[in-house]
Image: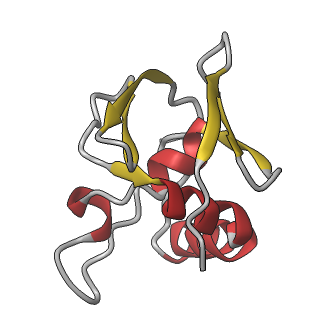
Amino acid sequence: MTAVWPTELRLSSDKRTLTVSFDNGETHAFPAEYLRVCSPSAEVQGHGPGQKKTVPGKRNVLIYQVEPVGNYAVRLHFDDMHDTGIFTWSYFLELAHEEDRHWGTYLRELEEKGLSRDR
């Protein structure tokens, strides 16, 4: 399988959406909230099975910087000071192709834990 590479990353002027275009013709717009709560960082994902954290209160989070990491990823800097997630090109595609599963799991976990997207 040939790796898919980004051709453009564009942060919206309001800092709420990151759009990623790939050389296979796919383009995906990612809300900042979705990227923040699905950050691949250890802070969110944990250090092992069963350690994933549910991050509440991120409905209005913004992305204020997109920093290249080598030629394989970017580090996103959010306005809540989270900046430890390294988003690889393949992870962006996973988030795009499995958005319903990731987002549904997040919303279900919020409800189960009595948490909210707003606080």
Q: Looking at the rendering, which quadrant does residue 92 occupy?
A: bottom right
Q: For this view, does 114 lie left or right of residue 49?
A: right
Q: Is residue 37 left or right of residue 12?
A: left
The colour scheme used to paint the residues is: secondary structure
Does residue 68 appear in this view?
yes
Out of 50 and 35, give the one closest to the viewer: 35
Give residue 6's quadrant in the image: top right
Q: Is residue 56 visible?
A: no
Which residue is found at the position 71% from the left and 49% from the top?
23
Q: Position of residue 115 (x, y in %)?
A: 49, 59
In this view, 96 is above or below 32: below
Q: Residue most toward the right?
A: 25
Could you tell me which residue is drawn at 57 percent across and 29 percent down? 60
Q: Height in image: 56 above or below 7? A: below
Q: Position of residue 102 (x, y in %)?
A: 61, 71
Residue 63, above or below 83: above
Image point (59%, 71%), residue name: 2
**Image-based side of 16 in relation to 58, left or right:** right
Between 83 and 89, the residue placed more toward the observer is: 89
Residue farthest along the front direction in this orientation:
2
Q: Is residue 113 above or below residue 12?
A: below
Q: For the point 53% across and 77% down, which residue is it?
A: 112
Residue 96 in the image: x percent, y percent? Answer: 69, 60
